[in-house]
Image (cartoon, rainbow, N blue to C red):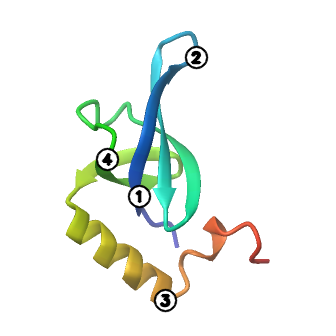
């Protein structure tokens, strides 16, 4: 199953010769990179839903934390943890 995972934007910078907005997004202790091209209004501290490295929407903190909690309960976050095989 392919899911969008909520995470908090830690930092934003321009990459690829200044053409693409990229963010470092925190997912429950794991940081991954995601493009912000679909959510140009997203800012540091915002929560976003990320699907295959692309932030697809901005969500509020409560919704993000609840969703992350449910995904963790059903074991859908194992691929975020590099120690899980």
Residue at numbered disc 3: 74
Can you tell which of label 2 and label 1 is closer to the viewer? 1
The answer to which quarter of the image holds residue 7 is bottom left
Can you tell which of label 1 and label 4 is closer to the viewer? 4
Labels 4 & 2 near each other (Cβ < 8 A): no
As displayed, is residue 29 above or below residue 34?
Answer: below
In depth, the one of 42 and 11 nearer the eye is 11
Horizontal relation, residue 34 to residue 43: left or right: right
Q: Residues within 10 Å of mark 3 (few under 14, many from 20)?
A: few
Horizontal relation, residue 6 to residue 1: left or right: left
**Sequence order check, earlier mark of 1 and 4:** 1
**Sequence order check, earlier mark of 3 and 4:** 4
Disc 4 is placed on an element classified as loop
Residue at numbered disc 2: 16
Residue 64 x/y as whole percent: 30, 67
Q: CA distance from mark 2 to mark 1?
A: 23 Å
The answer to which quarter of the image holds residue 36 is top left
Residue visible at 47% across and 25% down? 13
Q: CA distance from mark 1 to mark 4?
A: 10 Å
Quarter occupied by the C terminus: bottom right
Labels 2 & 1 near each other (Cβ < 8 A): no
């Amino acid at each position: 199953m392919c899911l969008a995972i909520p995470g908090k934007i830690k930092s934003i910078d321009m990459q690829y010769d200044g053409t693409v907005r990229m963010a470092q997004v925190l997912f429950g202790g794991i940081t991954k990179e995601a493009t912000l091209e679909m959510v140009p209004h997203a800012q540091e501290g915002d929560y976003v839903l990320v699907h295959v490295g692309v932030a697809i929407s901005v969500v509020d903190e409560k919704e993000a934390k609840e969703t992350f909690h449910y995904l963790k309960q059903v074991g859908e976050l194992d691929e975020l943890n590099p120690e899980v095989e």
